[in-house]
Amino acid sequence: VQLQASGGGLVQPGGSLTLSCAASGFTSDDYAIGWFRQAPGKEREGVSCLRVGDGTYYSTTYYADSVKGRFTISRDNAANTVYLQMNSLRPEDTAIYFCAVDTNPNPPVYELGYWARSTLYDHWGQGTQVTVSS
């Protein structure tokens, strides 16, 4: 399993960026891809997650309170890619952003709010730096 995160960069406060996570090497119809971030001196935190099940006909999305209304997670099945559209960026969004995949998600665990636990995810991509600064 390989995950390739890209799309980071330097943006001014209030600006937008779209991160991409290209996934390969797994064929499960049920999976969850999460975006996490880690700022200097802080713990890694879950930002958003997209969980797919039931033959990929539906997906459920989850967001951290700090990004609700500003970030949108989506997927392109044909491209095997999950995106994180980030709008109204703030300096506190500055961090290294990682994507990760849980290839055997347990739906109740996600529905109970544990989607942001990094231990659920069994494969991780490298990070991409997002810097929000004027």
Image (cartoon, grey):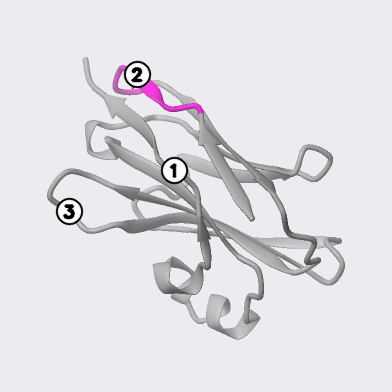
Residue 126: image tag: 1
Which of the two residues, 68 or 75, is positioned nearer the viewer here? 75
The magenta region covers: 7-14
Q: Residue furthest bottom?
A: 108
**Where's residue 36, x and y in %?**
41, 52
Residue in the picture at 55% in, 75% down: 110
Magenta stretch, main secondary structure class: loop
| Relative to 61, residue 19 above or below | above
Residue 11: image tag: 2
Residue in the picture at 29% in, 27% down: 131
Residue in the picture at 40% in, 41% down: 127
Residue in the picture at 75% in, 69% down: 30
Q: Amino acid type of disc 2? A: Val
In this rendering, position of residue 70 left or right of residue 77: left
Q: Earlier in the sequence, mark 3 or mark 1?
A: 3
Nearer the camera: disc 1 or disc 2: 1
For label 3, the residue is 42
6 within the magenta span: no
The answer to whether residue 39 of the structure is visible from this angle is yes
Q: Secondary structure at mark 1?
A: loop
Q: Residues within 10 Å of mark 3 (few under 14, many from 20)?
A: few
The answer to whether residue 117 of the structure is visible from this angle is no
